[in-house]
Image (cartoon, rainbow, N blue to C red):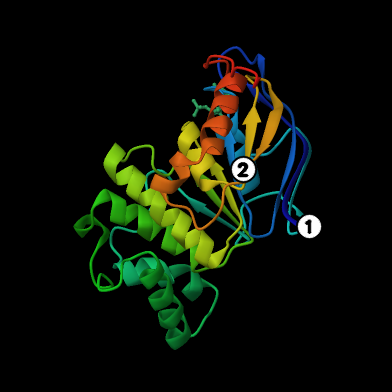
Amino acid sequence: MNALEIHKLSKEYADRYTGETIPAIGEVTFSIGAGEFVSVLGPSGCGKTTVLNIVAGFIEHTGGEVLVGGNAVHGPGPDRGVVFQSHALFPWKTVLGNVTFGLRMKGVARAQREEAAADILELVGLSGFERKYPHELSGGMQQRLGVARVLVNEPEVMLMDEPFASIDAQTRRKLQQDLTGIFEKRRPTVFFVTHDIDEAVFLSDRVVVLSSRPSTVAEIIDVELPRPRNWRDTVEDPRFRDYTHRIEELLGGGEPVAEAG
Ligand SMILES: Nc1ncnc2c1ncn2[C@@H]1O[C@H](COP(=O)(O)OP(=O)(O)OP(=O)(O)O)[C@@H](O)[C@H]1O
C-alpha cells in the first residue's frame, strides 16, 4: 500500500473580494510509496503549497481524494508531520522539550521519549544541545530541530514546504546533504515542495513536475541516482544534469536538450 495517494485532486478558491472562482489545482494524481522521497516542483503559483496543505489537512479540497495510509484526509492528524519553512518551534521550550512534545501528547512515558529524542538528536547532529532554547541555535540548527521534532513521532508522511528557502546558499547545501543522510538512515516517507530543481533531484527518488495553474501533473521523473548521495559525486553523475535539464524544459525555462546522435 502507498503511504500517500492523491487521486484526481482539484481545488478552487473563492476570491475574497469578487467571490469569483479561482481554479488552483486542475487535476493532480500521484502517490508516494512507504519510505520514498518525492518532491513536487512547478511554476510559481501552480498550487504546490495548496496540494501540501490539503494533504496536511489544513485546507479542504474541492474534488478528488487524498489517502494517508489508506485513510481519507479530512483535517490535520498525527499521521502527518509538517516541517515548516519558519521552523514553527516552541520558543519557550528547550531543544529536548521541542522534540519530546509530540510524544508527551501521545502519552509516551518519559524514559522512552527521552531515549527516542536522544536517537533523533544524534541523527540530526544536535546531541549536546538538549538544554538550549531555539533562539540560541543558528537557522540551520533550528531547521534540523524542526526535522527532528517531526521525525521523532514517526508519522506516516512527513510534509516539507520549502524548508530551506530562507537559508543562505552555503548552509542550504549542507542541510540538503544532512537531510539526505537522515533520510537514508531512517527512510521516512517524504513529500517535499521546492522551487529548486537541483535540490529536488539531489534529494528525491521521484520528482513530480506540475504544469502552471490550474495544475496537472506534467511528468513524473524517476531519479535513478545511487544512494548514499553526496553533492560532489551526485553533480558529477551525467544523469544528474539530464534530470535537471528535463525539468527545466518542462518548466519552460531551459534550452531544449539536444537529441543524442
Ligand atoms: N487562500 C487563497 N485564496 C485565494 N487564492 C489562493 C489562496 N491560496 C492560494 N491561492 C491561489 O492559488 C494558486 C496556488 O497557490 P499556491 O501557494 O498553492 O502555489 P505555489 O505553487 O505553492 O506557489 P509558489 O511557487 O509561489 O510558492 C495561486 O494562484 C494563489 O494565488
Q: Could you tell me the amino acid type at mark 2?
A: Val
Q: Quadrant of residue 213?
A: top right
Q: Quadrant of residue 249?
A: top right
| Residue 135, image quadrant | bottom left
Type of amino acid at the residue the image marks with label 1: Gly
Quick check: which quadrant has ligand 1?
top right
At 78% from the left and 57% from the top, the residue drawn is 70
Q: Report x, y in % for residue 258.
A: 60, 17
SS at badge 2: loop
Q: What percent of the width, then of the height, locates residue 144?
A: 37, 57
Quadrant including the N terminus: bottom right
At 42% from the left and 63% from the top, the residue drawn is: 148
Residue 223, numbered circle: 2
- Locate residue 225 relative to residue 100 in the image: left or right: right
Residue sitting at x 46%, y 61%: 182
The residue nearer to you, when weighing 8 against 19, is 8
Q: Which residue is mark 1?
A: 70
Mark 2: is the Cβ under 8 angstroms from ligand 1? no
Q: Name, please, the residue furthest toward the left.
A: 136
- Horizontally, residue 81 falls left or right of residue 65, namely left
**Above or below, 77 relative to 244:** below
- Label 2 packing within 10 angstroms: few (<14), some (14-19), many (20+): some
